[in-house]
Amino acid sequence: QQNVQQSPESLIVPEGARTSLNCTFSDSASQYFWWYRQHSGKAPKALMSIFSNGEKEEGRFTIHLNKASLHFSLHIRDSQPSDSALYLCAVNSGTYQRFGTGTKLQVVP
Amino acid sequence: EAAVTQSPRNKVAVTGGKVTLSCNQTNNHNNMYWYRQDTGHGLRLIHYSYGAGSTEKGDIPDGYKASRPSQENFSLILELATPSQTSVYFCASGDQGGNQAPLFGEGTRLSVL
């Protein structure tokens, strides 16, 4: 069974900093890799995804995927207080997504 | 506009009672999902459905049943609620294939006393 782990559990960074969040998975046949953002008391919302090895950038956000290492990451450039949220990674290796345990990010002014 | 609506948004139940959580989607998605979210565990899949009349077990189905009477509606049923089922429950809908992210409802906060 797919095992998805995130690190760190929580993170406090100053405004303007670069933030890095990590996700590891156990099933090498996994095909789709997602990051979600969840503000307090709200629904998780898909942030961005990647399907093949390498890097994908959308605005201040970049995903890196290394399937051989069973690892992908989310990098946030110029972190803003509005980025403060719970970040969840998710992996598809079949019919549905399995989620990591989440990283709570706080960006302080 | 695509939407997933859950009801109720908050529920307090007694141990041993029956609880039904409802979910409605207007996205015409085939797949629907029920997850629970607990601190330290992320989102864990309870049941899912491929379409009307189908239900499948997810990773943590024990103590839960599901019902998909129509394309739009998917219910989660706790026949005998226990305090360990106190959690936030999210319903989601999505198309087949992992290249589309499911759309989540706003969640139901359930407390079993």
Image (spheres, coloured by chain):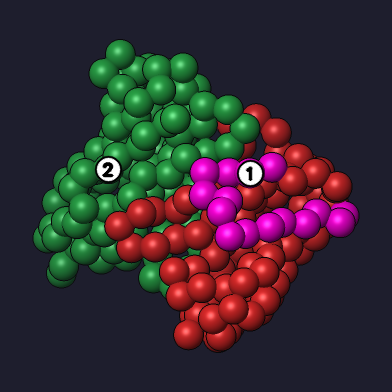
Chain colours: A green, B red
Residue B58 belongs to the span the image colors magenta = yes
Q: Quadrant of residue B38?
A: bottom left
Q: Residues within 10 Å of mark 2 (few under 14, many from 20)?
A: many
Instruction: Answer left or right for B2 relative to A62.
Output: right
The residue shown at (34%, 18%) is A67
Residue A39 in the image, given as x and y percentages of width and height = 40, 66
Quadrant, the C terminus of chain A = bottom left
Magenta range is B56-70
Compared to A11, does A54 lie above or below? Answer: above
The secondary structure that most of the magenta stretch takes on is loop
Which one is closest to the eye, mark 2 or mark 1?
1
Residue that mark 1 sits on: B57
* Residue position marked by numbered label 2 in the rendering: A6
At horizontal 33% and vertical 50% (from top left) the residue drawn is A101
Question: What x and y, as percent, mark residue B110?
Answer: 53, 76
* Residue at 43% over, 49% down: A36
Do tags 2 and 1 sit on the same chain? no
The answer to whether residue B106 is magenta is: no
Check disc 1 and report its element: helix, strand or loop: strand
Q: Chain of mark 1?
A: B
For image coordinates 52% across by 44% down, the residue present is B59
**As rendered, which of B58 and A63 lies closer to the eye?**
B58
Residue B109, given in percent of the width and then of the height, sits at 52, 76
